[in-house]
Amino acid sequence: MAGRPGWGNENGAALLLVIMLVLVLGAIGAAVSVATRTETLIAANFRQGRETLYVAEGAVAQAVHDLATQPDWSTVLAGAALSTFTDGAATGQRTLPGGDIVTLCCGQPSLTSDVQERALGGRSWGADTPVWQMFAWGRAADWLPAGRIDSAMYVVVWVADDPEDGDGNAAIDSNGVILLHGHALGPRGGRQVIDAAIGRDTPAPAPTPVRIISWREGRW
């Protein structure tokens, strides 16, 4: 090899070039893998967010349907009348999607106590301050016979008196208007809130159509 001066240097340069190429390709592969995983997570979070919203809206809509069959909303505000959709006693714990365990009602800590503190921005109207009562709760999949709804979401809907009726009693409906506060709870702490107000003429025999006064996505 005497006639090929610098052969060893050429070999070293080629080896260095190969190593650099491998590193570049490895970095590109890692970047593509991270990007693909990120896109997958973004898509999954978007799908869950849409599902959670639709389930929350469905829960409140179901509650509105059941409220139309109640002749006296004061019994609902007092906790004496419930939706057709419940999965047992309001007291006690439930296992949410993802494995979290929560207490629905009552006392602290519980979902109901959180709603009482945070709903409507935690504002007070004195004796007319809404007292939130659980009205509907359960797994969204249980709305229809088994296998008809593919959802892991758990929903809860509370009702409360309209503070603007000014009657000084949060357990009595004096103006035919009540408030609803619905939660859909999903995996990984996913949550969507719907706030609504509905009304009807009083006195009203059941079933009586109700009107939607307001309906919006809430914050939590």
Image (spheres, grey):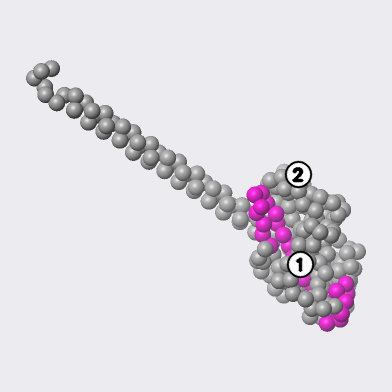
The amino acid marked with disc number 2 is Ala
Taking the image as shown, residue 93 lies to the left or right of residue 121, namely right
Marker disc for residue 125: none
Marker disc for residue 117: 1
**As drawn, 6 above or below 56:** above
Taking the image as shown, residue 52 lies to the left or right of residue 29, namely right
Q: Please give the residue where the numbered disc 2 appears in the rendered image.
A: 146
For the residue pair 141 and 205, the one nearer the viewer reads as 141
Is 53 part of what is drawn in magenta? Answer: no
Element on which disc 2 rests: loop
Distance, label 2 to label 1, CA atoms, is 36 Å
The residue carrying pointer 1 sits among few (fewer than 14), some (14 to 19) or many (20 or more) residues within 10 Å by Cα, namely: some
- Foreground disc of the pair 2, 1: 1
* Residue farthest toward the left in the current orientation of the protein: 3
Q: Residue at x 61, y 55 (%)?
A: 49
Please report the bounds of the magenta region as a residue range: 166-193
The residue carrying pointer 2 sits among few (fewer than 14), some (14 to 19) or many (20 or more) residues within 10 Å by Cα, namely: few
For the residue pair 208 and 85, the one nearer the viewer reads as 85
Residue 145 placed where, x, y %?
77, 47
Taking the image as shown, residue 95 lies to the left or right of residue 189, namely right
- Please state, as top left, top right, bottom left or bottom right, where the C terminus lies in the image: bottom right
Element on which disc 1 rests: helix
Count of all numbered marks drawn on residues in the image:
2
Work out whether mark 2 precedes mark 1 in sequence or the reverse, and give the earlier one.
1
For the residue pair 69 and 86, the one nearer the viewer reads as 86
**In this view of the protein, can residue 45 be seen by the observer?**
yes
- Please state, as top left, top right, bottom left or bottom right, where the N terminus lies in the image: top left
